[in-house]
Image (tube, rainbow, N blue to C red):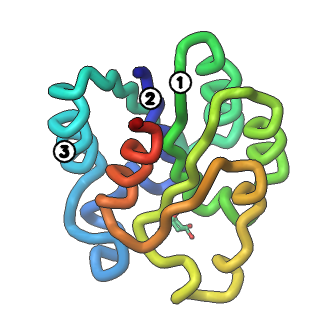
């Protein structure tokens, strides 16, 4: 099984960025942990992070060629991007939306996700474990 772990804007700042909300782990720490979980199970992970909406959309379109699933944390684009939603609904690969923080316990603008309705499911509030749960959602 091949899974794309796709992170959007500002998630490259993890570790330094609002650690009280997002934790002290860097994105590299999280990715290493996911790799450690996935490798023995023969799950192949590909990691992409971009601060650019178009790169996220290109990556989603291109993953059709090879991915069985996508674990996507779209960062702030969750709440704003019709284009990202359209990209998700235009591909057949299932996408699981993940967030480190519990977006419903935060500002009201974070309560709206433009992408949830076109995702297979949504995981929010479990810190780095949200990504792990996302991967597990694709396992038998
Ligand atoms: C986030 C939540 C978003 O509201 C925020 O813009 C982020 C991170 C999360 O992982 O909790 O950048 O997606």
Q: Is mark 1 within 8 Å of ligand 1?
A: no
For disc 2, the neighbor class at 10 Å (few under 14, some 14 to 19, many from 20) is many
Q: Do the residues labelled 3 and 2 touch (CB within 8 Å)?
A: no
Residue drawn at x 70%, y 33% is 57
Residue 135 placement: quadrant: top left
Query: Which of the two discs, 3 and 1, sits closer to the camera?
Result: 1
Q: In this view, does 100 lie to the left or right of 38?
A: right
Which residue of the protein is positioned furthest toward the top in this rendering? 65
| Residue 5 drawn above or below residue 44 | below
* Alpha-carbon span between mark 3 and mark 2: 15 Å
For disc 3, the neighbor class at 10 Å (few under 14, some 14 to 19, many from 20) is some
| Residue 28 drawn above or below residue 77 | above
What SS does tag 3 mark?
helix
Q: Where is the C terminus found, in terms of image quarters?
A: top left
Q: Is mark 3 within 8 Å of ligand 1?
A: no
Residue carrying label 1? 68
Which numbered disc flags the more N-terminal residue, 3 or 2? Answer: 2
Which numbered disc flags the more N-terminal residue, 2 or 1? Answer: 2
Q: Do the residues labelled 3 and 1 touch (CB within 8 Å)?
A: no
Residue drawn at x 28%, y 74% is 19
Q: Residue 79 carries which label?
A: none
Q: How far from the left and from the top, in percent, is residue 74? A: 58, 52
Residue carrying label 3? 33
Q: How far from the left and from the top, in percent, is residue 82? A: 84, 51
Which numbered disc flags the more N-terminal residue, 3 or 1? Answer: 3
Q: Where is the N terminus found, in terms of image quarters?
A: top left
Residue carrying label 2? 3
Q: Is residue 137 left or right of residue 17?
A: right
Q: Which of 23 and 98 is in front in this view?
A: 98
Q: How far from the left and from the top, in percent, is residue 10? A: 47, 56
* Alpha-carbon span between mark 2 and mark 1: 6 Å
């Amino acid at each position: 099984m091949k899974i794309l772990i796709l992170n959007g804007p500002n998630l490259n700042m993890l570790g330094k960025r609002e650690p009280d909300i997002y934790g002290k782990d860097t994105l590299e720490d999280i990715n290493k942990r996911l790799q450690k979980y996935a490798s023995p199970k023969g799950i192949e992970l590909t990691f992409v992070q971009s601060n650019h909406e178009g790169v996220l959309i290109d990556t989603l379109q291109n993953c059709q060629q090879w991915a069985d699933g996508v674990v996507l944390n779209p960062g702030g684009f969750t709440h704003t991007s019709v284009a990202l939603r359209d990209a998700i609904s235009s591909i057949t690969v299932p996408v699981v939306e993940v967030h480190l923080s519990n977006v419903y316990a935060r500002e009201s603008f974070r309560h709206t996700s433009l992408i949830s309705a076109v995702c297979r499911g949504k995981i929010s509030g479990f810190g780095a474990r949200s990504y792990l749960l996302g991967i597990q959602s694709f396992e038998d």
